[in-house]
Amino acid sequence: MQFSAQELAAILGADLEGNPEVKVNRPGKIEEGGPGTITFLANPKYEPYIYTTTASVVVVDRLFLAKGPILATLLRVDKVYESFSRLLAFYDQAVQARPQGISPLAAIDPTARLADSVAVGRFSTIERGADIGPDVVIFDQVYIGAQVQIGAGTIVYPGVRIMHQSEIGEHCVLHPNVIIGSDGFGFTPNAEGLYQKVPQVGKVVLENYVDVGANSVIDRATIGVTRIGEGVKLDNLVQIGHNVDIGPHTVIAAQTGVAGSTKIGRYCRIGGQVGFVGHVSIADGTQIQAQSGIAGAIEEPNQAWFGSPAMPYRDFIRSHAVFKKLPALYRQLHRLEQELNQLRKRDE
């Protein structure tokens, strides 16, 4: 799919400098370029490449002053990063082949309510009482359970499973094979010591602008709600247990697991492979390094933590510096003990 520089300038409200008819069909790096690519210059460190790039179009700041000849067509904008992000979104939507309208191969219960602008792909299922808002895009092979609610503008990619009574906000993105509302991990031993399932009758609520990465799972509450706050971003392969509450605008990297009933505050940043014990609270603005283990509550906001069990970041770095010296310290201690024993024998 190709677009002219003139068409892209209209989308961005950009001033065009160069050939308005040059065609682009893909984004690229400024240092790599290539005919048909569009790229951008925002960081002055990369300015030398603009004079040698073979890209067809470059997005630059409106006030950029060239220090030499440039072969590419320029699109001058006020905010380069923001404008190029818009172009990437435009390109992504163009190449995805999103479903249009309702596929005749979809299975939709007659009691489900779909806004007129909803798109549903092939072999997707929407169960009874579901309520799907305007401009929602549901790709192929999606399952939407009974009484699920999905807000306007949300995108649901192939293979997603949204179980009954889950509530998805507006402008959320659920990437391939996400599962929302699976049963929480609830079992109790009986008199014989055998584990019996505790029914999980709560639900999951995703607020607006939540992004859930591929193959991530968010369990329904035992009773009440598992809640993911507005603007939360979850990476791939993240496990959220039952009755967890994640505050707005927190980001969590891949392979993190959050045990049940943990409460994570607002604007937290959590690295990959972090493990949370259940029933603890994490203060707003907490930063947790990758592969840390959170075994207790974190009460002071805006602090960095590291290690397993985790401790304040600077304490961990100091402790690790000492830990690396332990073999040498042990050898030195052993030598001192030998010298001390020799002195004692001499005194005897």
Image (spheres, rainbow, N blue to C red):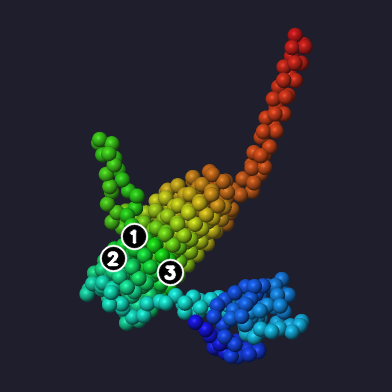
Residue located at (26% from left, 68% from top) = 127
Residue located at (32% from left, 73% from top) = 122
Give the quarter of the figure containing the C terminus.
top right
x, y percent for residue 217 = 39, 58
Q: Residue furthest top?
A: 348
Tally the marks: 3
Residue type marked 2: Gly
Q: Earlier in the sequence, mark 1 or mark 2?
A: 2
Q: Quadrant of residue 149?
A: bottom left
Q: Earlier in the sequence, mark 2 or mark 3?
A: 2
Q: Residue beneath label 3, please?
A: 173
Residue located at (29% from left, 42% from top) = 195
* Label 1: few (<14), some (14–19) or many (≥20) C-alpha neighbours in 10 Å: many
Q: Residue furthest front?
A: 35
Residue type marked 1: Gly
Residue located at (64% from left, 42% from top) = 320
The answer to whether one can see residue 117 in this image is yes
Give SS at disc 1.
strand
x, y percent for residue 51 = 72, 79
Q: CA distance from mark 1 to mark 2?
A: 10 Å
Give SS at disc 2.
loop
Q: CA distance from mark 2 to mark 3?
A: 17 Å
Q: Residue beneath label 2, please?
A: 145
Residue 233 higher or lower than 65, as above or below: above
Please tell me the numbered disc located at residue 181.
Answer: 1
Residue type marked 3: Val
x, y percent for residue 12 = 56, 84
Q: CA distance from mark 1 to mark 3?
A: 16 Å
Decide if residue 69 is on the left or right side of residue 295.
right
The reply to whether the C-beta atoms of the residues labelled 2 and 3 are less than 8 Å apart is no
